[in-house]
Amino acid sequence: LDSSVIALKHDLFLVQSVDFFYPLIDDPVALGRIALANVVSDVFAVGATEIDQIKLIVTAPTEFTDKEREVVVPMVMQGFLEAAKECNAPVKIGSISENPWCIIGGAASAVCHRSELIMPYNAVEGDAIILTKPLGTQLATNAYIWMNESSENWTRLQERLSKADIEETYRIALESMSRLNRKGAELMRKYDAHAATDVTGFGIYGHAENLASFQKAAVDFHIDTLPIIKNVREIADVLGRSAKLLAGKAVETSGGLLICLPRANAAGFCAEYRDCTSHEAWIVGSVKKGNRSVKMDPNLQYLTVGES
């Protein structure tokens, strides 16, 4: 879906993905960590858990002074390299170019055996659908920026939320975006996943829709639960942005894996994920007979996800 899978010799495959985004927080080290997690996520989504090489892609804004560039770019690289160590991935750093916009990301490559791959098109009727990270990262990070800039949006948010509320929400989002999807990918294999993707710019609805369209079987993905970061529903409500969030269409950054696997294995997956990561994974829906589309339950359940 978001990575290429190329057949090589001897039942080996090359999995590659290129991804980048624009800065959404003002912490360069954390930004580098999020960028790495985002880059490797598409590779993990097809079950490849050993990354063979990552190439860092970063451009420094032309509006930076020489001093700002000398300080900020190495900090971004530091976070990127620290996160790469978590998945034992060697990083190749190319030239750092200048650009009107700051772009951070990379290209990830993995060579794996056919038996390691989980191709994203084998969901079957009766499967459970699991999500491994909460939703609401974009609004959570934006609210933190609005607060620090004392913007008009922050003035409105203060009617319902305190500075401590926004800071807590930001911490939850930061941890979630920085967390690698590797453990989820490892458990996908153990619990016989049939298909998966990651949730990023198109929201859970958009990525579920894309995944559903690729299925071999004529099935629909029924979503009945949305786990949302604490306070994000209130942020959306105050600012009149609830429609997209509550429909699963809000933009996400470095989101979790959306996984279809046998319902009998779903509870075991979630329990082991919690034991290994100290974070929750949620059963958010099911696969039913249909026409390769997404159905949102009219009585969606919204879960509030706080700090662990």
Image (cartoon, rainbow, N blue to C red):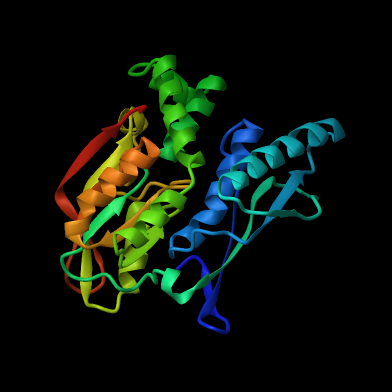
Quadrant hosting residue 24: top right
- Please state the horizontal and vertical placement of residue 216, each as a whole percent of the image: 29, 79
Q: Quadrant of the N terminus?
A: bottom left
Left-right relation of 7 to 271: right
Left-right relation of 76 to 294: right
- Please state the horizontal and vertical placement of residue 227, each as a whole percent of the image: 28, 40
Q: Is residue 260 visible?
A: yes
- Please state the horizontal and vertical placement of residue 184, each as a whole percent of the image: 39, 52
Q: Spot the residue most to the right.
A: 66
Vertical order, 163 against 223 (above or below):
above
Vertical order, 289 against 158 (above or below):
below
Q: Quadrant of the C terminus?
A: top left
Residue at x 56% of width, y 42% of height: 34
Of 137 and 106, the residue lying toward us: 106
Quadrant hosting residue 30: top right
Q: Is residue 134 visible?
A: no
Quadrant hosting residue 169: top left
